[in-house]
Image: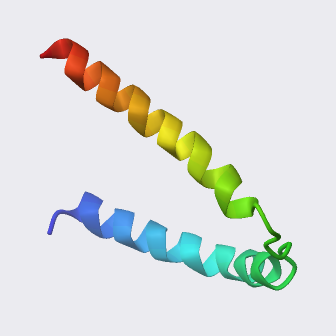
Amino acid sequence: MDWMQILAVVFAVMMLFVMWPAYKHWSANSPKAEKGDWQAVILPLAAVAALVALLVMSVR
């Protein structure tokens, strides 16, 4: 392994170590899912997928 790769792995581990308390706080205090939340997520994702499919089909 190159020294840059080792440095990148060390930096990534340090970032995970620093972010762990924030993750615990966010997961403990996150809002609970309500009715209709999944539909609100799926609709924009479907729109993006349709746009990508349209762009791919327009290139061919």
Q: Is residue 9 left or right of residue 20?
A: left
- Identify the residue at horizontal 79%, vertical 75% (top origin): 26
- Identify the residue at horizontal 41%, vertical 38% (top origin): 49
Q: Is residue 37 left or right of residue 55?
A: right
Q: Say which quadrant the C terminus sits in.
A: top left
Image height of 59 relative to 12, above or below: above
Nearer the observer, 59 or 23: 59
- Identify the residue at horizontal 82%, vertical 70% (top origin): 34
Q: Name the image quarter holding residue 50.
A: top left
- Identify the residue at horizontal 41%, vertical 27% (top origin): 51
Q: Say which quadrant the N terminus sits in.
A: bottom left
Q: Position of residue 2 (x, y in %)?
A: 17, 63
Q: Position of residue 33 (x, y in %)?
A: 79, 72
Q: Name the image quarter holding residue 36.
A: bottom right
Image height of 4 relative to 16, above or below: above
Q: Is residue 58 left or right of residue 40?
A: left
Nearer the observer, 30 or 53: 53
How many numbered marks does the figure carry? 0
Q: Name the image quarter holding residue 27.
A: bottom right
Q: How is the image coloured?
A: rainbow
Q: Position of residue 18 (x, y in %)?
A: 66, 75
Q: Position of residue 12 (x, y in %)?
A: 46, 69
Nearer the observer, 7 or 13: 13
